[in-house]
Image (spheres, rainbow, N blue to C red):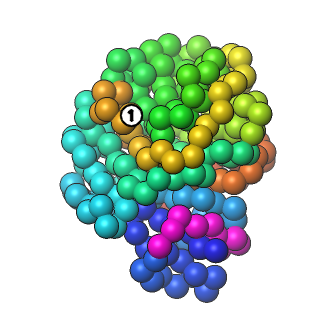
Amino acid sequence: MNLIRWDGRRLDNRSKVRNGHGPGVADGLKIGELSLTNQLLYMPFHEWTGTRQIRKGNRVLVQGAATFGEDGMRLNGTDGRASFYTTFDGLIGDITIEAWVRFVDSGGGGFGRVLDNTKLIIFVSATGSIATESDGSTVANSGVGTIVLDNSWYRISITRSALGAVVFYVGTPTIPMAVADGGDPDSGIPVVGNLLYVGNNTGGSRGLNGAVDGVVLYRGIRTLADAERGRLATVANGRYS
Protein backbone atom coordinates (compact mmCIF):
# COMPACT_ATOMS: atom_id res chain seq x y z
CA MET A 1 0.00 0.00 0.00
CA ASN A 2 1.07 3.62 -0.45
CA LEU A 3 0.84 6.95 1.27
CA ILE A 4 -1.30 9.63 -0.33
CA ARG A 5 -0.07 13.16 0.24
CA TRP A 6 -2.44 16.08 -0.08
CA ASP A 7 -0.74 17.30 -3.24
CA GLY A 8 -2.14 14.27 -5.06
CA ARG A 9 1.16 12.40 -5.37
CA ARG A 10 1.93 8.89 -4.18
CA LEU A 11 5.17 7.40 -2.87
CA ASP A 12 6.04 3.77 -3.55
CA ASN A 13 8.37 1.67 -1.44
CA ARG A 14 11.44 3.11 -3.17
CA SER A 15 10.37 6.67 -2.25
CA LYS A 16 9.82 7.64 -5.88
CA VAL A 17 7.08 10.15 -6.68
CA ARG A 18 4.38 9.31 -9.18
CA ASN A 19 0.75 10.05 -9.84
CA GLY A 20 -1.48 7.92 -7.68
CA HIS A 21 -4.84 7.01 -6.30
CA GLY A 22 -5.87 6.36 -2.73
CA PRO A 23 -6.03 6.93 0.10
CA GLY A 24 -3.40 4.44 1.11
CA VAL A 25 -0.89 3.56 3.79
CA ALA A 26 2.88 3.72 3.78
CA ASP A 27 5.02 1.40 5.87
CA GLY A 28 8.58 2.36 6.78
CA LEU A 29 9.09 5.11 4.19
CA LYS A 30 10.57 8.53 4.77
CA ILE A 31 9.88 11.91 3.24
CA GLY A 32 12.24 14.60 4.41
CA GLU A 33 12.62 14.15 8.16
CA LEU A 34 9.35 12.30 8.81
CA SER A 35 8.99 8.56 9.20
CA LEU A 36 5.87 7.41 7.37
CA THR A 37 5.38 4.14 9.24
CA ASN A 38 1.63 3.54 9.67
CA GLN A 39 0.73 6.98 8.37
CA LEU A 40 -2.65 7.37 6.72
CA LEU A 41 -2.26 10.96 5.49
CA TYR A 42 0.46 13.60 5.52
CA MET A 43 -0.32 17.24 4.75
CA PRO A 44 2.87 19.33 4.20
CA PHE A 45 1.25 22.71 3.72
CA HIS A 46 4.64 24.47 4.00
CA GLU A 47 5.49 23.04 0.57
CA TRP A 48 2.74 25.13 -1.00
CA THR A 49 3.13 28.83 -1.81
CA GLY A 50 0.73 31.69 -2.40
CA THR A 51 -2.95 30.84 -2.86
CA ARG A 52 -3.64 27.61 -4.71
CA GLN A 53 -6.97 26.26 -5.88
CA ILE A 54 -6.56 22.52 -6.15
CA ARG A 55 -9.03 20.88 -8.48
CA LYS A 56 -11.33 18.13 -7.31
CA GLY A 57 -9.56 15.65 -9.54
CA ASN A 58 -6.37 16.22 -7.54
CA ARG A 59 -8.20 15.41 -4.31
CA VAL A 60 -7.78 18.72 -2.48
CA LEU A 61 -9.90 21.85 -2.71
CA VAL A 62 -8.71 25.06 -1.07
CA GLN A 63 -11.56 27.42 -0.27
CA GLY A 64 -11.99 30.90 1.17
CA ALA A 65 -9.35 32.92 2.99
CA ALA A 66 -6.51 30.39 3.04
CA THR A 67 -2.97 31.17 1.89
CA PHE A 68 0.22 29.13 2.01
CA GLY A 69 3.86 29.79 2.82
CA GLU A 70 6.82 28.36 4.70
CA ASP A 71 4.78 28.51 7.91
CA GLY A 72 2.01 26.31 6.53
CA MET A 73 -1.63 27.10 5.79
CA ARG A 74 -2.61 30.51 7.16
CA LEU A 75 -6.22 31.15 8.15
CA ASN A 76 -7.99 34.19 9.60
CA GLY A 77 -10.92 32.62 11.42
CA THR A 78 -13.42 33.07 8.60
CA ASP A 79 -14.17 30.68 5.71
CA GLY A 80 -10.72 29.37 4.78
CA ARG A 81 -10.18 25.61 4.67
CA ALA A 82 -8.64 22.73 2.77
CA SER A 83 -10.85 19.74 2.06
CA PHE A 84 -9.86 16.23 1.11
CA TYR A 85 -12.18 15.56 -1.79
CA THR A 86 -12.47 11.80 -1.41
CA THR A 87 -14.51 10.34 1.42
CA PHE A 88 -11.93 9.32 4.00
CA ASP A 89 -12.56 6.37 6.29
CA GLY A 90 -9.30 6.41 8.24
CA LEU A 91 -10.60 8.07 11.44
CA ILE A 92 -12.15 4.96 12.94
CA GLY A 93 -10.31 2.52 15.18
CA ASP A 94 -7.12 3.43 17.04
CA ILE A 95 -5.66 6.64 15.58
CA THR A 96 -3.16 9.39 16.35
CA ILE A 97 -3.36 12.90 14.90
CA GLU A 98 -0.33 15.21 15.07
CA ALA A 99 0.20 18.76 13.80
CA TRP A 100 1.93 22.06 14.30
CA VAL A 101 -0.67 24.74 15.06
CA ARG A 102 -0.38 28.48 15.76
CA PHE A 103 -3.40 30.12 17.37
CA VAL A 104 -4.14 33.85 17.25
CA ASP A 105 -7.44 33.27 19.02
CA SER A 106 -9.97 30.45 19.25
CA GLY A 107 -11.44 31.17 15.84
CA GLY A 108 -14.96 30.93 14.43
CA GLY A 109 -17.54 30.92 17.20
CA GLY A 110 -14.85 30.08 19.75
CA PHE A 111 -14.45 26.60 18.24
CA GLY A 112 -11.84 26.96 15.50
CA ARG A 113 -11.28 23.62 13.79
CA VAL A 114 -7.93 21.96 13.35
CA LEU A 115 -9.60 18.97 11.69
CA ASP A 116 -13.22 18.08 10.97
CA ASN A 117 -14.88 15.19 9.18
CA THR A 118 -18.30 15.83 10.79
CA LYS A 119 -18.15 12.68 12.91
CA LEU A 120 -14.74 13.40 14.44
CA ILE A 121 -13.58 16.94 15.12
CA ILE A 122 -10.53 18.51 16.75
CA PHE A 123 -10.81 22.15 17.74
CA VAL A 124 -9.43 24.85 20.01
CA SER A 125 -11.84 26.35 22.51
CA ALA A 126 -12.14 29.91 23.80
CA THR A 127 -10.57 28.72 27.10
CA GLY A 128 -7.39 27.72 25.32
CA SER A 129 -7.78 23.95 25.35
CA ILE A 130 -7.55 21.45 22.52
CA ALA A 131 -10.63 19.27 22.37
CA THR A 132 -12.00 16.31 20.44
CA GLU A 133 -15.55 15.13 19.88
CA SER A 134 -17.02 12.22 17.94
CA ASP A 135 -20.55 12.05 16.58
CA GLY A 136 -21.96 14.58 19.07
CA SER A 137 -20.39 12.84 22.06
CA THR A 138 -19.12 14.23 25.33
CA VAL A 139 -16.13 16.44 24.55
CA ALA A 140 -12.69 15.35 25.72
CA ASN A 141 -10.34 18.29 26.27
CA SER A 142 -6.75 18.95 27.22
CA GLY A 143 -7.59 21.20 30.15
CA VAL A 144 -8.19 24.93 30.44
CA GLY A 145 -5.24 27.05 29.34
CA THR A 146 -3.20 24.23 27.81
CA ILE A 147 -2.82 26.26 24.63
CA VAL A 148 -1.97 29.94 25.01
CA LEU A 149 -3.75 31.96 22.31
CA ASP A 150 -0.74 34.17 21.65
CA ASN A 151 0.27 33.48 18.04
CA SER A 152 2.91 30.96 19.14
CA TRP A 153 3.51 27.53 17.61
CA TYR A 154 2.42 24.39 19.44
CA ARG A 155 3.01 20.77 18.58
CA ILE A 156 -0.08 18.69 19.35
CA SER A 157 -0.42 14.92 19.37
CA ILE A 158 -3.82 13.40 20.10
CA THR A 159 -4.42 9.68 20.44
CA ARG A 160 -7.91 8.23 20.33
CA SER A 161 -8.65 4.54 20.85
CA ALA A 162 -11.46 2.72 19.10
CA LEU A 163 -13.34 2.88 22.43
CA GLY A 164 -12.96 6.66 22.72
CA ALA A 165 -10.11 6.98 25.25
CA VAL A 166 -8.26 10.21 24.41
CA VAL A 167 -4.78 11.38 25.45
CA PHE A 168 -3.40 14.82 24.58
CA TYR A 169 0.32 15.60 24.27
CA VAL A 170 1.43 19.22 23.78
CA GLY A 171 4.84 20.80 23.23
CA THR A 172 6.44 23.87 21.64
CA PRO A 173 9.55 24.43 19.52
CA THR A 174 11.58 24.66 22.75
CA ILE A 175 9.53 22.66 25.28
CA PRO A 176 9.32 18.84 25.06
CA MET A 177 6.01 17.10 24.58
CA ALA A 178 4.11 16.41 27.80
CA VAL A 179 0.78 14.88 28.74
CA ALA A 180 -1.98 17.49 28.93
CA ASP A 181 -4.95 15.31 29.75
CA GLY A 182 -8.36 16.33 31.05
CA GLY A 183 -12.10 16.08 30.52
CA ASP A 184 -14.26 13.03 29.92
CA PRO A 185 -13.67 10.29 27.36
CA ASP A 186 -14.78 11.00 23.83
CA SER A 187 -17.66 8.51 23.83
CA GLY A 188 -18.89 8.89 20.25
CA ILE A 189 -18.23 6.56 17.35
CA PRO A 190 -16.71 8.06 14.17
CA VAL A 191 -18.32 6.72 11.01
CA VAL A 192 -17.04 6.20 7.49
CA GLY A 193 -17.95 8.13 4.38
CA ASN A 194 -17.34 11.76 5.40
CA LEU A 195 -15.17 14.36 3.69
CA LEU A 196 -12.19 15.58 5.68
CA TYR A 197 -11.50 19.29 6.31
CA VAL A 198 -8.50 21.06 7.83
CA GLY A 199 -8.90 24.54 9.31
CA ASN A 200 -12.69 24.68 9.33
CA ASN A 201 -15.92 22.69 9.46
CA THR A 202 -18.10 21.53 6.60
CA GLY A 203 -20.11 24.76 6.58
CA GLY A 204 -17.13 27.11 6.76
CA SER A 205 -18.32 28.68 10.03
CA ARG A 206 -15.67 27.38 12.47
CA GLY A 207 -12.52 28.77 10.91
CA LEU A 208 -9.21 28.46 12.70
CA ASN A 209 -7.53 31.81 13.35
CA GLY A 210 -3.83 31.15 12.94
CA ALA A 211 -1.91 28.56 10.98
CA VAL A 212 -1.60 24.80 10.70
CA ASP A 213 1.13 22.68 9.15
CA GLY A 214 2.40 19.14 8.89
CA VAL A 215 -0.85 17.41 9.82
CA VAL A 216 -0.24 13.67 10.08
CA LEU A 217 -2.79 10.93 10.69
CA TYR A 218 -1.45 7.65 12.03
CA ARG A 219 -3.05 4.25 12.28
CA GLY A 220 -2.56 3.13 15.89
CA ILE A 221 -1.74 4.75 19.23
CA ARG A 222 1.55 6.63 19.47
CA THR A 223 3.30 7.11 22.80
CA LEU A 224 4.74 10.20 24.47
CA ALA A 225 8.19 9.11 23.28
CA ASP A 226 6.85 8.81 19.71
CA ALA A 227 5.30 12.28 19.96
CA GLU A 228 8.57 13.77 21.22
CA ARG A 229 10.56 12.16 18.41
CA GLY A 230 8.12 13.72 15.95
CA ARG A 231 8.52 17.13 17.57
CA LEU A 232 12.31 16.95 17.49
CA ALA A 233 12.39 15.77 13.89
CA THR A 234 10.18 18.57 12.59
CA VAL A 235 11.47 21.41 14.75
CA ALA A 236 15.04 20.82 13.60
CA ASN A 237 14.43 22.80 10.40
CA GLY A 238 13.69 25.97 12.41
CA ARG A 239 10.40 26.52 10.62
CA TYR A 240 8.32 26.93 13.80
CA SER A 241 10.70 29.05 15.90
Residue 114 spot, x, y in % from top left: 46, 36
Residue 155 spot, x, y in % from top left: 57, 41
Instruction: Identify the residue at horizontal 65%, vertical 33% (top origin).
Output: 189
Whether residue 98 sits left or right of residue 62 in the image: it is right
Instruction: Identify the residue at horizontal 40%, vertical 69% (top origin).
Output: 8
Residue 201 spot, x, y in % from top left: 38, 34
Where's the N terminus, which quadrant? bottom right
Q: Is residue 107 magenta?
A: no
Magenta range is: 21-29
Could you tell me which secondary element the residue under label 1 belongs to?
A: loop
Up/down of 225 relative to 107, above or below: below
Whether residue 109 sits left or right of residue 102 in the image: it is left
Up/down of 56 relative to 21, above or below: above
Comparing 35 with 151, the one in front is 35
Q: How many numbered marks appear?
A: 1
Give the class, few, some or many, for how many residues have Cα within 10 Å of label 1's Cα (few <14, many ≥20). many
Instruction: Find disc 1 in the rendering and name its residue.
Output: 201
Whether residue 228 sits left or right of residue 66 in the image: it is right
Residue 9 spot, x, y in % from top left: 43, 73
- Whether residue 27 appears in this view of the structure is yes
Instruction: Identify the residue at horizontal 56%, vertical 22% (top origin).
Output: 136
